[in-house]
Image: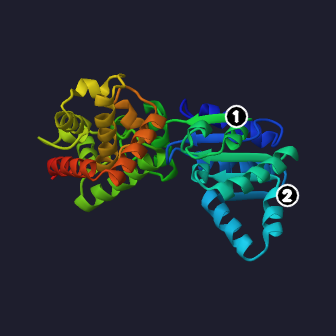
């Protein structure tokens, strides 16, 4: 469904489906997991096939492209491999962020991109971040990925989430089963991706059925406790693990304030604990990147990605840091029990 969070990407995809290779080439879609990038890309392919059934379409993930390239070198079928990709009319490539650090794959993809672009054939790419923020990606590929349209897909706002849930209920003929106030409750408190929203409906129905209870807001709160925003689940319990608890624990460990962690200040004294807090929110709460950013003064998801990668690297390289984080993690996990 189209809402404010994806209207630019949807409009660009529609334009591409009407005139592939002539507008927005390449079309680069980016956003967090489960927000519909791949779905939108495939929708373009279906629309093109309906208009032009003879169109040659190739859909592939970056990892598969790499594996096929390696296989073609081993089996000495490189020319056949190149012909398959360079003679297609519409190339759809999922998760191009996995090109990072793969020099040979990037070299091959660079020439494939050039061949298709020069022939006026459409290329659509997806990633979890914009081209300029993919680490280890050659500058020449970054430049080419930005030639056409770069469009992000954000988390759906509350109105969009309500529409998604209503649509799911309608498609599954559940309008009479799930009251409107329950749909609104889920939309207001499950602020993640489309998959999580639809999964919430399925889990709620299963929970109510097993407990032999009518679906109400209270039942929804019980059933979806692990999916609710930090704080909402805790409101039904005396204590619990949430973003505030993590920030407080990290701030105490590093001798800073929670206000400092949420501030825009970038001093070294605040950057390290802020990154650790983001990492622990991802690990312990399973929050989306945008949700984590919102807990730290509205930082964007690319900043969160950098923080997660930085902590992961430091954990591997510095044993004392790893022990400190492990001790803090154990303390926080005890709050959730």
Say what secondary structure mark 2 lies in.
loop
10 Å neighbourhood of mark 2: few (<14), some, or many (≥20)? some
Residue at position x 52%, y 50% in the image: 171
Of residues 327 and 207, the one nearer the viewer is 327
Query: Against 272, is 263 above or below?
Result: above
Which sits earlier in the primary sequence, circle 2 or circle 1? 2
Query: Residue 38, percent across and down?
Result: 60, 50
Q: Quadrant of residue 243?
A: top left
10 Å neighbourhood of mark 1: few (<14), some, or many (≥20)? some
Of residues 50 and 307, the one nearer the viewer is 307
Q: Which residue is mark 2?
A: 87
Q: Quadrant of residue 269?
A: top left
Q: How was the colour assigned to the protein in this rendering?
A: rainbow
Do the residues under discs 2 and 1 have CB atoms within 8 angstroms? no
Say what secondary structure mark 1 lies in.
strand
State the mark number for residue 149: 1
Question: Can residue 195 be seen from the camera position used here?
Answer: yes
Query: What distance separates the C-alpha of mark 2 from that of mark 1?
Result: 23 Å
Of residues 335 and 103, the one nearer the viewer is 103
Query: Residue 84, percent across and down?
Result: 80, 63
Query: Residue 119, percent across and down?
Result: 88, 47
């Amino acid at each position: 469904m189209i809402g404010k969070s994806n209207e630019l990407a949807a409009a660009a995809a529609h334009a591409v489906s009407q005139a592939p290779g002539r507008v927005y080439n390449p079309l680069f879609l980016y956003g967090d997991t489960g927000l519909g990038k791949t779905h939108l890309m495939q929708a373009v392919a279906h629309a093109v096939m309906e208009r032009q059934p003879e169109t040659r379409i190739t859909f592939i993930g970056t990892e598969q492209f790499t594996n096929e390239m390696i296989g073609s070198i081993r089996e000495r079928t490189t020319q056949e491999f190149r012909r398959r990709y360079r003679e297609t009319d519409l190339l759809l490539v999922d998760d191009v962020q996995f090109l990072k650090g793969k020099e040979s794959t990037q070299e091959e993809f660079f020439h494939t991109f050039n061949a298709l672009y020069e022939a006026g054939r459409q290329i659509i790419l997806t990633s979890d971040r914009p081209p300029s923020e993919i680490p280890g990606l050659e500058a020449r590929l970054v430049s080419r990925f930005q030639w056409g349209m770069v469009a992000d897909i954000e988390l759906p706002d509350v109105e969009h989430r309500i529409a998604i849930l209503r649509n799911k209920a309608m498609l599954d003929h559940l309008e009479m089963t799930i009251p409107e106030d329950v749909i609104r409750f889920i939309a207001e408190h499950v602020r993640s991706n489309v998959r999580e929203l639809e999964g919430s409906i399925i889990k709620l129905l299963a929970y109510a059925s097993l407990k032999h209870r009518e679906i109400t807001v209270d039942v929804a709160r019980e059933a979806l406790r692990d999916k609710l925003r930090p704080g909402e689940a805790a409101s039904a319990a005396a204590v619990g693990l949430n973003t505030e608890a993590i920030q407080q624990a990290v701030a105490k460990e590093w001798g800073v304030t929670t206000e400092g962690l949420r501030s825009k200040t970038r001093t070294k004294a605040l950057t390290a604990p802020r990154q650790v807090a983001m990492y622990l929110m991802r690990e312990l709460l399973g929050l989306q990147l945008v949700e984590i950013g919102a807990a730290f003064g509205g930082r964007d998801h690319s900043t969160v990605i950098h923080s997660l990668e930085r902590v992961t690297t430091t954990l591997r390289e510095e044993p004392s840091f790893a022990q400190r984080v492990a001790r803090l993690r154990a303390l926080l996990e005890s709050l959730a029990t």
